[in-house]
Image (cartoon, rainbow, N blue to C red):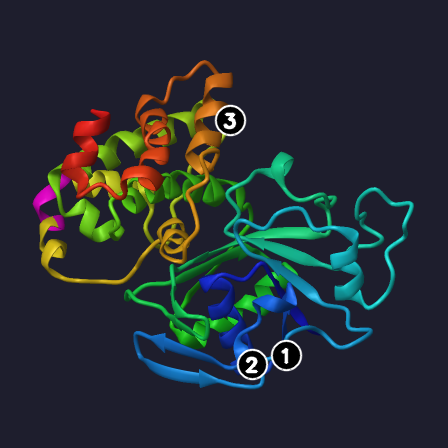
Amino acid sequence: MTVSIVDPGPLGMLLSALLHLKGIPVAFQPRASAPCGGRIRVNLPGGRLLVEGLDPEPSDGASPFLLAMEGSGPMDREAFKRLMGRPARPQQPSVTDQDAPMGAFINTLRDGAERPDIKPSPWETCLVLAEPVMLDGACVELEGPEAAVVVPRGSRVAGLLSSLGSFGFSFHAVEDMSPYLDSYRVLKLLDLPVAMCNTTRTHFLSFPEGRQIAAHVLEEGLLACRKTGGKAGRLPVSDPTELMRRMGRNPRAFEAARFLPDRCFNPALQRLMRGGVLDPKGHNRRVVEKAAGAGLNLEWNWKLCQKVSRIHGAGFFLGPAELLAAIG
């Protein structure tokens, strides 16, 4: 079985390399996203690896298992035609269960109503709790001592991603993914303020102003989760509820990270570093609008959304203190 990585960014490149090392054929969609020469250098906390022989796309007739990375948009019929090695039916306005291969959404920030134009029954959702950094088009680095995989118990993707355990990932098979996805979506609300300050989460939280912003952003996210029918589960890595408790119990414990450089740049900041832009209708904005439908006013998240255009005009904020002054 070929695994096709759809819309690969840093996480997609990392998964491609590690799955290939476990003997699983890996392909890329779109083809242009494949690493030059089919080679990826991987820097892990335990050492460096050189992965060679990656194919840009599956061979004709292959029936791939799709892994769609966070941020993947709607997949059109032509994309499936290339992936499945057979023509899509022209009369079909969207891909149905009969057309689509099996697949999984990795780290999706969108709920079922917002997913690509595929019926959800053959698709699964799972979490890969790691934030690798793409140093260049053929080198990806994973920093930090902890990384984890959360998958539906007994699913096809569980068997596939369990192989990451040999690279230091903890593996968690759960009955219901929904609480874990809810917690992950709350945690990712922090990506926007951290990216706006051109830093990493640990460095951002080393400042009292950063912890103040984070506490308000996470508190609003958890409230919105509860009020819109969600339930925050406990993530094995970077759980937002536990993060809030730690900030309340011992805030000074975060301050040492101010002097310990790291490169755990989140996906939003990496897009900016590669010349991209922050989406003014991104994750924080969607959460604010969904909460508004339940009668909630997420003031801090809304104020952050209003400052997105400032990043593209005047540049990054100098730090959490300047950002807090702008939105507080």
Q: How far apart are marks 2 and 1 (CA)?
A: 6 Å
Are the residues tagged 1 and 3 within 8 Å (C-beta)? no
Question: Which residues make up the magenta segment?
Answer: 248-254
Q: Mark 3 points at which residue?
A: 229
Within-10-Å neighbours for mark 3: few <14, some 14–19, many 20+: few
Residue type (three-letter) at the residue carrying disc 2 = Gly
Q: How far apart are marks 1 and 3 (CA)?
A: 43 Å
Q: State which mark lies toward you, 1 or 3.
A: 1
**Residue at screen point 54% across, 53% down:** 126
Q: Name the residue under label 2.
A: 38
Residue 128 in the image, given as x and y percentages of width and height: 46, 58
- Asked which secondary structure carries label 2, the reply is helix
Mark number displayed over residue 55: 1
Foreground residue, 168 or 110? 110
Residue 154 seen? no
In primary-sequence order, the first of circles 2 and 3 is 2
Foreground residue, 100 or 244? 100
Within-10-Å neighbours for mark 1: few <14, some 14–19, many 20+: some
Q: In this view, does 22 lie above or below 69?
A: below
Q: State which mark lies toward you, 2 or 3.
A: 2
Q: In this view, does 231 lie above or below 167?
A: above
